[in-house]
Image (cartoon, rainbow, N blue to C red):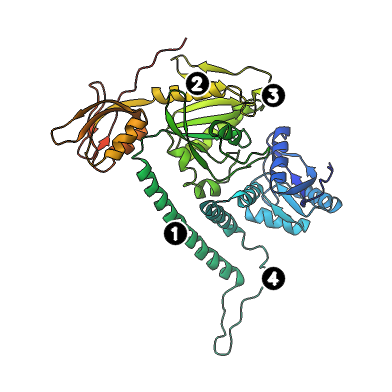
Amino acid sequence: MTEASPGSGERALLVRLGIGAPVDPEDVEEFRQLARSAGAEPVASIGGRRDRPDPRYFVGSGKAEEIRDTALAADAEVVLVDHALSPSQERNLEKLTGRRVLDRSGLILDIFAQRARSYEGKLEVELAQLRHLSSRLVRGWTHLERQKGGIGLRGPGETQLETDRRLLAQRVRVLTRRLARLKQQRETGRRQRAEIPVPSVALVGYTNAGKSTLFRALSGAEAYVADQLFATLDPLVRRLRLPGGVQIVLADTVGFIRELPHELVAAFQSTLTEAREATLLVHVVDASDPRRDERIEQVDAVLREIGAEEIPRLLVYNKIDRLGVEARVEYDVSGRVAQVWISAVQGRGLDLLATAIGERLARAAHRARLRVPVTAGALRARLYAAGSVRAEQTASDGSHELTVELPEIELRALARAPGVEVLEAPPDAGTCARSEGYLQSAPSVSASKRR
């Protein structure tokens, strides 16, 4: 099936097979969007069905010959395969077709390489690319013989392939050390921010669900917005005030996608910390997506992989303007806000969402009594500014004994601040490890039940 060429970029042949099931047209369309996001021109596509992958070509010998003939007829420069190929399968297809072959993981890595803007993001993408490339170095060096030494230095030498592997391993070590230093700097900044008890809310979701549009609508920040996959990569963080005066830190994170390469998940641990360390996750879903339930499950799988599955979550159905439905809030059986239906691009339901976030944060709050030293006046002022102080007493030594209400993760961070001591929680709470200054547990604040 030949498609009209858009007229710019690399001409690409798209290959997508149904393994054990027919090809899903939605998956084909998503892969076409991925190719365009990478700057390719899809000029032809090939589908099919197999019970299991072929060990040599993945697609089978007959289908591989069809790929070769179609690529020649369509003058395609690259073959993009919407599956994870082994290094040998990739090399065999390249040898047969005479074209570059890129699998799904390589394509996503290429998109990330184009979209990374921050120094840390670029390092993480390069590290992921090198790890992906490490098993594919055979390409291009099979024609070379062993290097020859000069007079008195003749011997078996080192092959070009071994040289490349050694250089790649050295570069991986350099990048790993640099990212470790950046992680240490990020952790230092996080410990400093822990003295400011402001809840953090992270926007997560499937790519192109409208997270950046929602982030810009809520915060007023100039976030880049485009109707394409992985339009934004580097996380953005802004502080804003919710109705009622509650301050939060809002973070826009990278979008997820099915079969996200493990190299990216491993490399982006520090960037994904915005989601892993959040007080509340706002899971943005494209309400008009016919496979939205499947997308929710795929995002949940990535959250489990990065260790964020236990963080409280609020489900937000975006793009209701495409469905023609009204903005609304839905509650679960316990009266807790469970879902909010909005249109970020039209600004419909944003007030409902802001109120829902405030309610979820309030219900996630815990109460504890802390002793703050007299030298920590700035910390005490910030607690009052955030509206977290419920009562205060002055001790004989001049220190302040504050009763505060904060989300548990913020209380834990506050309890580790220098000089802060956890005194007690209400009688029905758990225990506090006073000697370590570490809050073990505290009761949640009761909230009226919605009906």
Looking at the image, residue 107 lies above or below residue 25: below
* Disc on the earlier residue, 2 or 3: 3
> Which labelled disc corresponds to residue 177?
1
Which residue does the numbered mark 4 point to in the structure image? 143
Q: Marks 4 and 2, Cα distance to the nearest angstrom?
A: 61 Å
For label 3, the crowd category at 10 Å Cα-Cα, with few meaning under 14, some 14 to 19 and many 20 or more, is few
3 or 4: mark nearer the eye: 3
Q: Marks 2 and 3, Cα distance to the nearest angstrom?
A: 22 Å
Residue type marked 4: His
Residue at the spot x=55%, y=54% of the render?
A: 122
3 or 1: mark nearer the eye: 3
Residue placed farthest to the bottom in the image? 151
Residue type marked 1: Arg
For label 1, the crowd category at 10 Å Cα-Cα, with few meaning under 14, some 14 to 19 and many 20 or more, is few
- Disc 4 is placed on an element classified as loop
Residue type marked 3: Arg
- Disc 1 is placed on an element classified as helix
Q: Is residue 320 left or right of residue 389?
A: right
Residue placed farthest to the left in the image? 396
**Residue 28, image x, y percentages:** 72, 37
4 or 2: mark nearer the eye: 2
Q: Marks 4 and 1, Cα distance to the nearest angstrom?
A: 34 Å
Q: Nearer the viewer, residue 214 or 70?
A: 214
Residue type marked 2: Ala
